[in-house]
Image (cartoon, helix red, strand yellow):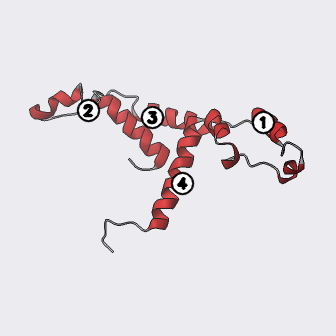
Amino acid sequence: MDVTEKHPDYNHRRECEWETMRDVWQGESRIKERHDHYLPRPSGWLQHADRGELAYRQYIQRARFPEFTAQAIRSMVGVLHGQPWHVQLPPALDYMRERATLDGLPLEVFSRRITTELLITGRY
């Protein structure tokens, strides 16, 4: 096995963790959109004539998901990027201050995006 290859179980586990963290980052509406993935139906409801569909919709509507994760990540990004930063770039790379990415993000905004991604998934 090459050192750059990862075991399939590792990849699957990481992808599941990243997916969960991205859902948590997006908040209550995303958690509710995923229905049974995060809010499984109680088995007793399946015995109802409509297989508990009405009760499940009400259950989803009443469910609350505290958005502590997104608030914490935004706060940490604010703390980490709260001070003005100074980056020394060689003249050949000075254009990156205003356009660091293909879609035109300035370097400082791109840095905030990287920080956010690191806090959500643990990697970029």
Q: Which mark is residue 77?
A: 3
Say what secondary structure mark 3 lies in. helix
Q: Can the viewer see residue 85 in this picture?
A: no
User: Which one is in front, 103 or 88?
Assistant: 103
Furthest-bottom residue in view? 1
Say what secondary structure mark 4 lies in. helix
Furthest-top residue in view? 98
Indicate left or right for 57 with 107 as reference: right
Residue 109 at x, y = what percent?
Answer: 34, 29
Residue 44 at x, y = what percent?
Answer: 88, 52
Measure the C-alpha gap from mark 3 to mark 4. Answer: 24 Å
Closer to the eye: label 4 or 1: 1
Given the image, on which type of amino acid does mark 2 rest? Leu
Indicate left or right for 86 with 58 as reference: left
Measure the C-alpha gap from mark 2 to mark 1. Answer: 43 Å
Measure the C-alpha gap from mark 2 to mark 3. Answer: 23 Å
Residues at circles 2 and 1 in contact by the CB criterion of under 8 Å: no
* Residue pictured at 26% horizontal, 32% vertical: 102
Q: Can the viewer see residue 56 in this picture?
A: yes
Give the mark, 3 or 1, whose residue is nearer the N terminus.
1
Q: Which mark is residue 102?
A: 2
* Residue pictured at 67% horizontal, 36% vertical: 66
Given the image, on which type of amino acid does mark 1 rest? Arg
In the rendered image, which residue does mark 4 sit on?
16
Give the mark, 2 or 1, whose residue is nearer the N terminus.
1
Closer to the eye: label 3 or 1: 1
* Residue pictured at 39% horizontal, 35% vertical: 113
User: Which one is in front, 57 or 113?
Assistant: 57
Measure the C-alpha gap from mark 4 to mark 2. Answer: 28 Å
Given the image, on which type of amino acid does mark 4 rest? Cys
Closer to the eye: label 2 or 1: 1
In the rendered image, which residue does mark 1 sit on?
57
